[in-house]
Amino acid sequence: MAEARIVEPPRFCSRCGSPVVVVDASYCKECGAPLAATVWLNRAIGWRPWTALLLSILPGLGQWYKGQRLRGVIWFLVVLAFYGLQPVGLMLHIICAGNAALSGALKDDSPQRWSQLRRTATRSGARPT
Ligand SMILES: [Zn+2]
């Protein structure tokens, strides 16, 4: 777990695909596109967040798809158990889908890096987002 923070997975510009060599770069040096969005997604994962989200139409299937089978079954049973108790069931279903799509997809330190990027962007005189 500790090594994951040290080893930075390679980043690529989402617009032109150029590799980003500067660890804390906020903008692509090739095309100038903001790189904030690429920081959020952990590229080391072997599944697609959107697929996990779509599969979550059936609660737990998104987790199952990610290989978290036990978690998927638990989500399915929990959401099913609460579906008769609206709006709790629907809320749980949404949380379940969000969890399937985002859990593990974002880096552990995303919020921290995000505010760090915003600070850097503001300092260099870029337009605020
Ligand atoms: Zn670029």
Image (tube, helix red, strand yellow):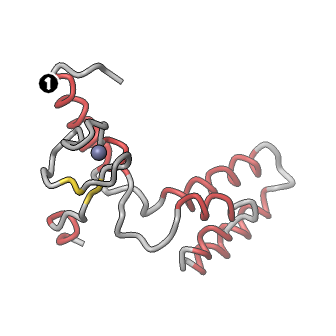
Q: Quadrant of the C terminus?
A: top left
Q: Nearer the viewer, residue 103 or 87?
A: 103
| Helix, strand or loop status at disc 1 | loop
Looking at the image, residue 33 sits to the left or right of residue 104; the answer is left
Give the total number of marks visible in the rendering: 1
Q: Residue 121: image x %, image y %?
A: 21, 28
Residue extending farthest right: 84
Q: Is residue 50 above or below residue 38?
A: below
Judging depth in this view, the residue of 42 and 25 nearest the camera is 25
Residue nearest the viewer, comparing 98 with 55: 55
Residue at figure coordinates x 17%, y 19% from the top left: 125
- Residue 27, given in percent of the width and then of the height, sits at 23, 38
In this rendered view, identify the residue nearer to me: 35 or 62.
Answer: 35
Instruction: Identify the residue at image location x=37%, y=44%.
Output: 37
**In the image, what residue type sits under mark 1?**
Ser
Occupied quadrant, residue 55:
bottom right
Disc 1 marks which residue? 124
Against 117, is 44 above or below?
below
Position of 109 with respect to 43 (left or right) is left
Specify the quarter for ligand 1.
top left
Q: Position of residue 67 (x, y in %)?
A: 54, 79
Q: Looking at the image, which residue is at 71% across and 64% down? A: 59
Q: Quadrant of the N terminus?
A: bottom left
Is residue 29 found left or right of 51 in the rendered image?
Answer: left
Residue 39 appears left or right of 101: left
